[in-house]
Amino acid sequence: AANWTYTGPDGEQHWSKSYPYCGGIFQSPIDIKPELLRFDPSLRPIEVQNYNLSPNEQLTLGNNGHSVQISLPSTMYISSLPNRYTAAQLHFHWGSASRPAGSEHLVNSKQSAAEMHIVHFNSDRYPNIASAVDKSDGLAVLGVLIDIGEFNPAFDQFLRFINGVKYRDQKVQVPAFNIRALMPARLDEYFRYDGSLTTPPCYPSVLWTLFRNPVTISRKQFLALATSLYSSHAQESTPVPLNSNFRKPQPTDSRVVLVSFKE
Ligand SMILES: NS(=O)(=O)c1c(F)c(F)c(S(=O)(=O)CCO)c(N[C@H]2CCCc3ccccc32)c1F
Ligand SMILES: [Zn+2]
């Protein structure tokens, strides 16, 4: 299949030619605007299990050409949803040094510097993520907005290895760490809606949870994320910087965004 990009002839306006769902319904991300919101008192705090990994374990940090990702052990899962959603990987979307606004979801048209996604699949119903990825109840992604501010020691647990994965398909093993520390303190305040993968094949298979409260990383940490990586392979003659890897907000159609908080 065509290798999709975020700009140029294989950019997001062209994705639907090779990946029809990208032109379909329930697409993500969206601009979460006040008129879409509906308070839902039944939305319980998100509860995650086994996120506090031991440094005796190792995680695979990788550059897949579209993002930097960390593969996660299947001992990690979300326990507060109707089915168990087991963790698969986490990855990021970010802007660039010249335009430090690269989150995928917007809140009231405000774009954050970056966004983290922790991807889980419905392990009550499907044996692996490959069989879950195109099912309407297949995936649950936890989204965390990232703003530039205070230095964040949890992010340095993987950022300090980022020069080992500069080029596409490079991977390094890193000591595992507490993934919960990458998330905001409050997991009870979030936006919830039915959406899709934000990359091809754009399957409308994602139960989105976007936490209300952002986390911060320092400008230096943001620049490490935004300027260290390439979407091209090491041996390619022209290196292609990997930045601004965010999809634009998609039509909301008649979707409602549920919120777990009142004010
Ligand atoms: N924004 S997003 O929608 O959450 C999102 C991404 F943006 C993103 F780039 C990726 S990717 O890095 O795998 C590159 C392209 O699929 C994923 N992968 C998921 C879904 C596809 C299959 C799969 C298999 C194993 C682990 C994770 C995933 C993704 F879900
Ligand atoms: Zn993502």
Image (cartoon, grey):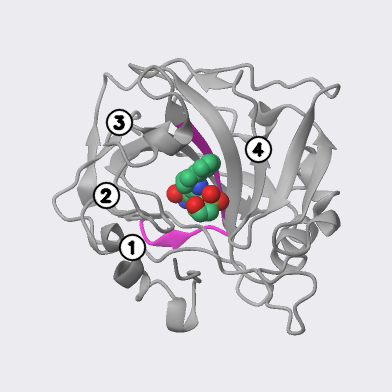
Secondary structure of residue under mark 4: strand
Between 4 and 112, the residue placed more toward the observer is: 4
Q: Quadrant of residue 239?
A: bottom right
Q: Amino acid at mark 2?
A: Pro
In the image, residue 51 sits, relative to residue 25, either above or below, namely above
Q: Amino acid at mark 1?
A: Tyr
Between 47 and 127, the residue placed more toward the observer is: 127
At label 2, counting other C-alpha atoms closer than 10 Å, the crowd grade (few under 14, some 14-19, many 20 or more) is: few
Q: For the residues marked 3 and 4, what is the alpha-carbon distance in whole angstroms?
A: 21 Å
Q: Disc 1 marks which residue? A: 19
- Please name which of the two marks, 2 or 4, marks the residue nearer to the observer: 4
Residue 134 image position (x, y, % from top left):
33, 42
Q: Is mark 4 within 8 Å of ligand 1?
A: yes
Residue 14 image position (x, y, % from top left):
35, 75
Q: Disc 4 marks which residue? A: 71
In the shown orientation, is residue 76 left or right of residue 131? right
Q: For the residues marked 4 and 1, what is the alpha-carbon distance in whole angstroms?
A: 25 Å
First in sequence: mark 4 vs mark 1: 1
Image point (35%, 32%), residue name: 138
Image point (30%, 31%), residue name: 137
Q: Disc 3 marks which residue? A: 137
Q: For the residues marked 2 and 3, what is the alpha-carbon distance in whole angstroms?
A: 26 Å
First in sequence: mark 2 vs mark 4: 2
Q: Amino acid at mark 3?
A: Asp
First in sequence: mark 1 vs mark 2: 1
Can I make out residue 156 in this image? no
Q: Disc 2 marks which residue? A: 34
- Please name which of the two marks, 1 or 3, marks the residue nearer to the observer: 1
Region of the chain picked out in magenta, as a range: 108-120
Q: For the residues marked 1 and 3, what is the alpha-carbon distance in whole angstroms?
A: 20 Å
Secondary structure of residue under mark 3: loop
